[in-house]
Amino acid sequence: MCFFSLIAMSFGIGYADEFHYNNLLIGDRASGMGGAYTAISDDASGLYYNPAGIVYSSGRNLSASVNAYYNLTKTYNNAIGSSDWVRTSSSLLPNYFGIVQPLGKYKFGFSYAVSDSAQEDQDQTFSNPPGMTVGGLPVTQYVINFNNQNATYNVGPSLAAEVTSKLAVGATLYFYQKNNQFILNEIKTTAVNTQYFQNNAYYTREENGIRPMLGVMWSPIDKLSLGVAVSQVYLLSSKTYGQQNLVTSGTATLSQFHVTDKRKYPLQVRAGAAYFATKNWLLSADASYYSKVENPTFGESNVSVTNIALGTEYYLSNAWAFRGGLFTNMANTPAVTTDPNTSPEEHVNIFGGSASISTFTRNTSVTLGASMSSGKGQAHITGGTGIQDLQTQGWTVSLSSTYSY
Amino acid sequence: MRQKILFVFLITVITLSAALAQGEGAVYVQSAKAKVMSAPSFKANVLAETVKGNKLTSLGKTGSWVKVIYGSKEGYISALLVSSSPPMAKQGLISDKDGEISNGVRRRASTFTSAAAARGLTHEDRKRSSTEEEVDYRAVTKMESLTMTADEVTKFAEGGRP
Amino acid sequence: MRGQYSIRWFALVAAVWLAAPGIAQAAEENWRQRTSMGEVVTTTDIAAEIEFGREVAARILGRYSVYDKPALIKYVNLVGLTLAQNTNRPELEFHFTILNTSDINAYAAPGGYVFITKGALGFMKDEAELAGVLAHEIAHVTEKHVVKELAIKGSDDSATSSIARIVGGSSDSARAAFAQAVDKAVGMLFKDGYKREDEAQADKTAVAVSALAGYDAGGLARYLERISTIKGSAVEVIDRTHPPFGARIAAIKDMMSAEGLGSVEGRKSKERFVEAMKDLK
């Protein structure tokens, strides 16, 4: 039983970017380093990557992403006749806040992270789209507008302890919430007034759960740090509601569904290595593995994904540092096929790079960062058997700050 | 195409950082005068004598000596005489303990250190807080009042009479 | 296939990454610590150090009176300042004075206050020995031994800013912390002594600074040898607060031969010294 095909009509439109796990880079230092932070994690932004690392933070600190702007553009080639269809989503929000506090022999932390966020508003009109008909008549005008919002929140405490001088462990217990809302209107008109098609669909999903994370950090030799963090989302409640009103030439069909099935999330394992070459220079590499997961109620069948990231941080002086990184954001969908019933909507592997520059005073740092990503792949968004080439381009700009006190 | 350019840019930047990180730095002479030796030893020949404030390119440390480039030559200078920041001017106390705001004070983010450093504790406060011993500030002031000019010291160092 | 191209680029970058470093620095204690502004010393830090040292100096002068012979004090200052000119802390103004006691010792407070006892002067034979002892005390100041020892770890790893914090604070807890810190510093001088490594560093630095200032580098060792044979109350404090003389002398001699200082000529200025010591009764 696949409810979602009801909504995906002329265009099988997905709900923001469900098809990748690494959509937003988070954290003052980490986002400049491509997210390769699991073996570093030694400040307030480390709470999200590997809570064990905060054992190595100096004292109390507080880190906040003041503002981040994300923008993603997807271009489906030849989706409407020979025209491309372009979708843009963007988001402007403070996406991270973390605080670390020593507590006796332990370090306590609290953080809030928005790991995914997108807002899409589309409003397009196509005249005489080729191949589109209603009741045998060619469509003279096709209007599509939709609004799609999704956000994923993680908020919760962390605790870390040093086991030996070379080994630390930590845990974070996030409360997880994912909200999704999708509103779609499609209207197809023909030369004859009474022959038209209209689709009004509304869909919302709210998921609440927990996301426990366990982390370990080990330095086998001086200057080398290895880190592993494991986490998984377990939903405690889920409410999915959809409603669709289809009108074809005067005949209306209203359908609704209300599902409380909870999706299964993949197990996430992040492993990283960092080499603290000098006081001025740091190199790190991360690999993140997400297990495969099936949610047949929701028509999802995701493959396992491994993303890698490489990062570097270089201090030009006591007061300035520069960071750079590379990352992947691989598709969690299998390859696109020509079968409209079983093909995933898209399969795009995205690669990106990031850079940031920070300026420091004794107790604070302010960072300006940017990243760019692009991907090429395929999509199957029309009802028929056609496969479209899909390109994605994303960029982000962020401003963040860390304060020690 | 854009993807390629992005990667090339990032690779260049990252390998540049690698090159820059290879240990070159600058050191500044802190002592009034400092000898640049031909080898890392007190027994070596003196190549030159440099003065306070001079910036030298450092090629790394060997024991208690720093290898530097002086003019066109490579030499060694004692690590005790140099530092990685330029020499600071002679410093006095936070003058007028009850109120003046000294220069670097407002720059600090931490509330206790900055503004409070200006307000400071008065001597009476500190005396009250000392639980044990006798203190003699007049003697300290007298000790501070004896100053010599750099010339006097230099003449003495060269063997003159005190 | 375009996807493959991207992967190849990625692999290239990764290879460059792994090949790039040719790092040649010795392992450091805290290798996780990044360069930070916390290491930068500001004028406020220096002022706080001097303010704190002044308090310690006041306590020292509360315990002992000054041996008030202006010409002799001036002489000691000239020797001391000659040495101070050969250190890396030009921002400090060093002040020297003589304590009126037959105890054999010398003291230094942060910020540049150095004290030598009448008793110690009485056992010296030449200016190089005086220089050695003063240089040892100057080294405690330039290497910030007291400041670092009192660093209150926790919220900030920087030693200098924790001193600044307690000097500057005007709350009750800051007052108490300040008094405690001064007590601890005075305890280091009269009871517990500095850390062994700090004493060793002070001895080595003293020999090097004496040599850099043109003095005979063996002065300190000679003086220590002479006073190591003394017993009684005059050496009570120095015995309690310093490592045994034998170990100190051996370490100094090792350092001198390693640095080739045994064969370097240096000033002893014996005549000038004897002339000045005429004031010592």
Image: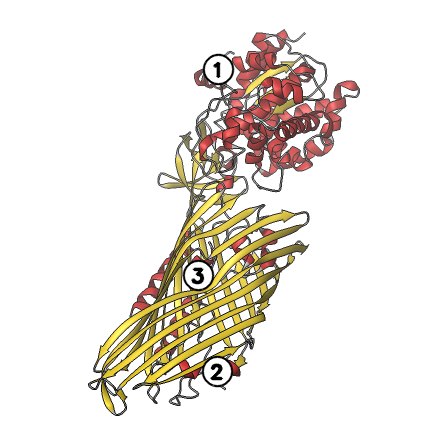
Query: Which marked residue is nearer to the observer: mark 3 or mark 2?
Result: 2
Q: Which mark is residue A299?
A: 2
Depth check, front residue: B117 or C252:
B117
Please state, as top left, top right, bottom left or bottom right, where the N terminus of chain C lies in the image. bottom left
The subunit letter for the residue under badge 3 reads C
Q: Which mark is residue B148?
A: 1
SS category of the residue bearing label 3: loop
The spot of residue A140 in percent (x, y) is 21, 83
Looking at this rendering, what residue extends furthest in the bottom direction? A136
Depth check, front residue: C163 or C83:
C163
Depth check, front residue: C33 or B75:
C33
- Within 10 Å of the Cα at label 1, are there few (<14), some (14-19), or many (20+) other Cα atoms? few
Q: Pointer 1 and pointer 2: residues touching (CB < 8 Å)?
A: no
The spot of residue A382 in percent (x, y) is 34, 84
Determine the residue positioned at 68% across, 18% down: C120
The spot of residue C4 in percent (x, y) is 38, 78
Q: Which mark is residue C20?
A: 3
Depth check, front residue: A296 or A187:
A187
Q: Is residue C20 left or right of residue C144?
A: left
Callouts 1 and 3 on one subunit: no
Q: Is residue B30 visible?
A: no
Name the amino acid type tagged 1: Met
Looking at this rendering, what residue extends furthest in the right direction? C232
C112 versus B19 height, above or below: above
C-alpha span from label 1 to label 3: 53 Å
C-alpha span from label 3 to label 2: 46 Å
Q: Is residue B20 left or right of residue C222?
A: left
